[in-house]
Image (spheres, rainbow, N blue to C red):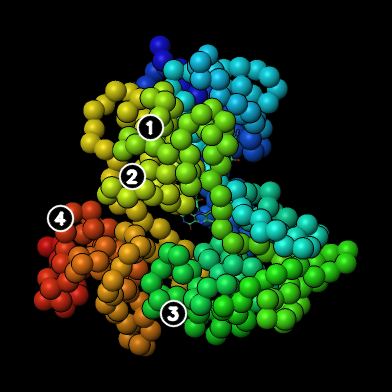
Amino acid sequence: SDRVVIVGAGQGGLQVAASLRQEGFAGPVTLLGDEPGLPYQRPPLSKAYMKDGDESRLALKPASFFETAGIDYRPGIIVAGIDRPAGEVVLDNGERLGFDHLVLATGARNLRPPLPGIDLPGVHELRGLADAARLRAMAEGVRRAAVIGGGFIGLEFAAVAAARGIHVTVIEAADRLMSRAVTPPISQRFLDFHRAAGVDVRLGALGTAVLGGRAAEGVALADGQEVAADLVLLAVGVRPNMELAAEAGLAVANGIVVDGHLRTSDPRIFAIGDCANFPLGGIATRLESVQAAVDHARHVARTITGAGQPPYDALPWFWSDQGPLKLQIAGLSTGWDDTHVLTDATGAVDTVLAFRDERLIAVEAVNQAGRHMAARKLLAGAPVMWDRLQGLDWDLRAALA
Ligand code: FAD
């Protein structure tokens, strides 16, 4: 029977293996991952794990799962190449594994801007469990931390560190926080929160070098200022891991290019999750989210088992926890041209409805779980227009009825 090989044992790779069995696929499934241990979830690394250091809640499945489900999981294995003519992957130890279907779920790696001093001890990044464990241990003893990059991961770390009494400076080049992913009112709500929590947020600030002799002592900014810090976290975004695909002659462009069924230009080979550039509503999209990795995986598992299905079109959703604020996003606000803002009893922004051409495209909610769930249902259905929501006094649940 058909052999499935999965490269990358993170959120997406593990889900392909699990979904194949759920769909009744009976052939051999091999899951190859370069990290040690059991496949684990990354979101807690900058949230609960950063706070409590409890590794026991990170694993996506217990060890017994792989045996019961008959999945050949091999940790600590780097896939070095794809031999398409032979239909084999080549492992770093020279071993070859034949496949009938190959799923690339290689994720992304952190961007490392070419700053002087970036390799000094005390400069950290946060992608895997090993990074998180190092960062946590180091943060025990520091008084001042600088975070380069005011995106989700940098801000989640900042919130945990500030709550622990560390003096944190966030250095963000754009004029607002999380600018690639959220609308301005949400950026402002989180800016207010972090500043009130004692975080020194510098907007429009470009880090140009890590200062220090034998270890990091701070960050130099383009305007000549210096931020003192014994710990520096680089959190300026990621690059998709697409070299395997490129070297095998598959199309890549900000990720491994796939069609509406997550297929590369080679029909035997799929790409999913952070490493995939896929069409969503006709627009080339690459998402870094648990939702995309999991929903891609389920789609590919159904395709491999032969289930006919329409092209992938799952609604994107995302969350980020920063201190007591839980941000939940339904849809993508990219290309919004108008917003409607709702506030809570204290006057703080707690929901932003984003529109394009009068059509609702995304809902950003802060500590409004019910509204987020309503938004997900609403956005997955027929178009919802500005006038209609206004007529319902912006009540998303009423719009569902
Ligand atoms: P990954 O889970 O990254 O797995 C890819 C795996 O492939 C890695 O283990 C990698 O080492 C391995 N690999 C790569 N190349 C090879 C090779 N050649 N051979 C073998 N193995 C290889 N998303 C949310 O939706 N909400 C959140 O709150 C959130 N918080 C996050 C916090 C942090 C700190 C991080 C790092 C990410 C967070 N994310 C969050 C993003 C989410 O974790 C990712 O989008 C998701 O893990 C993507 O799944 P994936 O399978 O594509 O990649």
| Quadrant hosting residue 362 | bottom left
Q: Which numbered tag is attached to residue 279?
A: 2
Relative horizontal placement of residue 277, taking residue 151 as reference (left or right): left
Q: CA distance from mark 3 to mark 2?
A: 32 Å
The first of marks 3 and 1 along the sequence is: 3
Residue 378: image location, x then y, percent: 21, 59
The answer as to whether callout 3 falls within 8 Å of ligand 1 is no
Query: CA gap, disc 4 to disc 1?
Result: 27 Å
User: Can you tell which mark lies on residue 263?
Assistant: 1
Give the label on residue 382, or none.
Answer: 4
Q: Residue 234: horizontal and vertical position, in percent?
A: 66, 62
Q: Amino acid at mark 1?
A: Arg
The residue at 54%/27% (across/down) is: 248
Q: Amino acid at mark 4?
A: Ala
Q: Residues within 10 Å of mark 1 (few under 14, many from 20)?
A: many
Which amino acid type corresponds to the residue marked 2 in the rendered image? Pro
The residue furthest top is: 1
